[in-house]
Amino acid sequence: MKFNTKIPKHLKQAYNEELIQYSSCLENKEYGSAWYHLERSHIIGQSYPIEHTYSHWLMLRFGFRQKDTKEVIGQIIRLLVGGWKSFINHVPLGNTGGANVPPLKRMSIPNDIEILLNTK
């Protein structure tokens, strides 16, 4: 069994870039774009416990900010189980992480992110 503990540098850089874009969009009240970058950060970091958990934490905060009860509840559930599933490498790749999709549903990965994930 493979255990994921530390995100590779090139993925960490891409993950951080998505979070910078998220923050910028949030600051400019571009909520749809902000959420888009949170989803992308989730896809990039979902195989790594710290990044995966942090993406869900930001999604929870976003849900509170938007007064979206479904998102808040969905993120609390994901926060309880997401990190350990990353650690044991048992995540549905491509899942965007929001409460609008089933937590165990595999989804297609955007091409640019797929290239990143396949780079060693």
Image (spheres, rainbow, N blue to C red):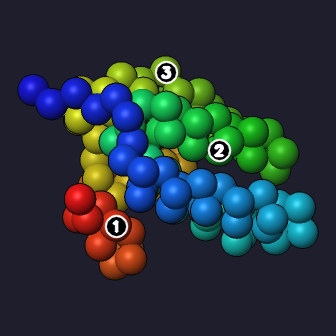
Report the side of 112 relative to 76 (left or right): left
Report the side of 35 relative to 5 (left or right): right
Q: Residues within 10 Å of mark 2 (few under 14, many from 20)?
A: many
Marks 3 and 1 sit apart, C-alpha to C-alpha, by 27 Å
Q: Earlier in the sequence, mark 1 or mark 2?
A: 2
- Which residue is located at x 53 percent, y 27 percent? 79
Image quarter where the N terminus lies is: top left
| Image coords of residue 71 (percent x, y) | 64, 43
Closer to us: 6 or 25 = 6
Residue identified by numbered label 3: 80
Q: Earlier in the sequence, mark 3 or mark 2?
A: 2
Q: Tell me which amino acid carries mark 3.
A: Leu
| Image coords of residue 64 (percent x, y) | 79, 39
Mark nearest the camera among 3 and 1 is 1
Residue 111 to residue 50: above or below: below
Q: Tell me which amino acid carries mark 1.
A: Leu
Name which quarter of the figure residue 58 lies in.
top right
Marks 3 and 2 sit apart, C-alpha to C-alpha, by 14 Å
Q: Tell me which amino acid carries mark 2.
A: Met
Q: Are marks 3 and 1 in contact (CB under 8 Å)?
A: no
Report the side of 64 relative to 54 (left or right): right
**SS at mark 3?**
helix
Residue 21 to residue 101: above or below: below
Image quarter where the C terminus lies is: bottom left
Closer to us: 111 or 94 = 111
| Image coords of residue 114 (percent x, y) | 30, 69
> What mark, if any, has residue 59 been given in the picture?
2
Q: Earlier in the sequence, mark 3 or mark 1?
A: 3
Residue 59 to residue 53: above or below: below
